[in-house]
Amino acid sequence: MRYKFKSGLSYENLLFDGMFLSVGDLKKQVAERRGMIATELAIHKPDTGEMYTSDAQLLPRNTQVVISRVPLGPQTKKVIVENKLEREAERQAQTASLTSNTFPVIPGAAMAGADGAGPGGAPIDEAAALSNFVDASYSNWSSEVHKGGR
């Protein structure tokens, strides 16, 4: 199968098994390659410009087609925005759960730049341990700079 976008200069090859490929499968594969949504693609015959209207229509091997983008309807845009908001909320929840976890102190083991325990020997979380490490590194660096070591 050879396809190109309406604004493209050259055709690209799409390999598939079998003698036929449905218009719907072609849209899915092209959308996956380009990071698009299959519903925003329209497939046309290159010579007549006639659009393939049914996703079930079969295209024979070695067919050339032209692909164009069509505007998404308001309902489709709404679903995309909702999905994006759901994914963002899920990411924020995961981040919040990761930053709220505390890690146990292992006797004899030191955390990077800290002893792994806060005031009174209580375990501190990863963010605090990282902050301690950065502070310790900065103090070491600044003391070396003031001594003329670097």
Image: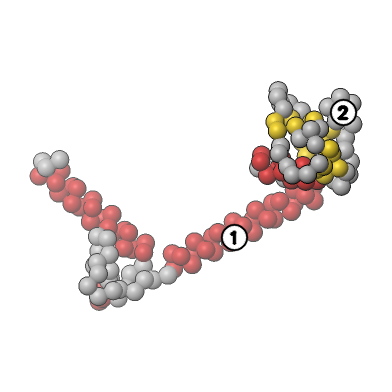
Tell me: 86 left or right of 78. left
Does 64 sit left or right of 97 as displayed? right
Residue 123, position as x, y percentages in the image: 32, 73
| Position in image of residue 141 (x %, y %) | 19, 48
The residue under label 1 is 89
| Residue bearing the label numbered 2 | 49
- The amino acid marked with disc number 2 is Gly
User: Residue 19 at x, y = what percent?
Assistant: 81, 41
The quarter of the picture where the C terminus appears is: top left
Residue sitting nearer the eye, 112 or 128:
112
Quarter of the figure with residue 72: top right
Q: Nearer the viewer, residue 119 or 64?
A: 64
Nearest to the observer: residue 139 or residue 70: 70
Q: Is residue 53 left or right of residue 69?
A: right
Please report the residue visible at 83 percent of the width from the left and 27 percent of the height from the top. 46
In the rendered structure, which amino acid carries the disc numbered 1? Answer: Ala
**In the image, residue 138 above or below residue 120:** above
Labelled disc at residue 27: none
Is there any visible trace of residue 72 in the rendered image?
no
- Asked if residue 133 is positioned above or below residue 8 in the image, the reply reads below
Report x, y in % for residue 143: 14, 49
Q: Is residue 86 visible?
A: yes
Q: Residue at x 59, y 56 (%)?
A: 88
Q: Residues within 10 Å of mark 2 (few under 14, many from 20)?
A: few
Q: Helix or strand or loop: what does disc 1 sit on? A: helix
Disc 2/disc 1 C-alpha distance (Å): 43 Å
